[in-house]
Amino acid sequence: MDAELKTLEEKIVQTVQLCQRLRAENIHLRQELATVRDENKRMHDKIDGAASRLETLLQHIPEVAEE
């Protein structure tokens, strides 16, 4: 009986340790995801700005008459 209780206690300790590691990893991944999302938004904003500037430049290019 004592051996079974000791085995059960060890499994509970391992489970608690696994939960703690997974919780820490989850926190880290959430922070990493937030960082990547912010970077992704900045990149989309840059692309939108570049596209807008390109459209403005294209509107100022005179059309070439075909011969």
Image (cartoon, grey):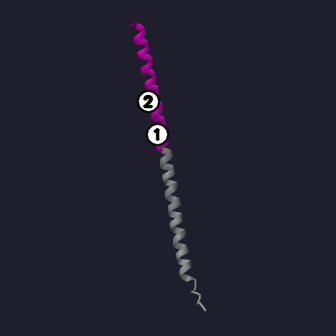
Q: Is residue 37 above or below residue 7?
A: below
> Of discs 2 and 1, which sits in the foreground?
2
- Percent position of residue 30, x then y: 46, 43
- Percent position of residue 51, x then y: 53, 70
Q: Is residue 12 magenta-colored? A: yes
Left or right, 1 with respect to 51, comes to left
Q: Is residue 25 above or below residue 4?
A: below
Q: CA distance from mark 2 to mark 1?
A: 12 Å
Residue range (magenta): 1-30
Q: Is residue 40 magenta-colored? A: no
Q: Residue at x 42, y 21 (%)?
A: 12
- Which quadrant is the N terminus positioned in? top left
Q: Is residue 59 above or below residue 48?
A: below
Mark 1, residue position: 27
Q: Residue at x 54, y 73 (%)?
A: 53
For label 2, the SS is helix
Mark 2, residue position: 19
- Which quadrant is the C terminus positioned in? bottom right
Amino acid residing under circle 1: Ile
Q: Residue at x 44, y 20 (%)?
A: 11
- Percent position of residue 31, x then y: 48, 44
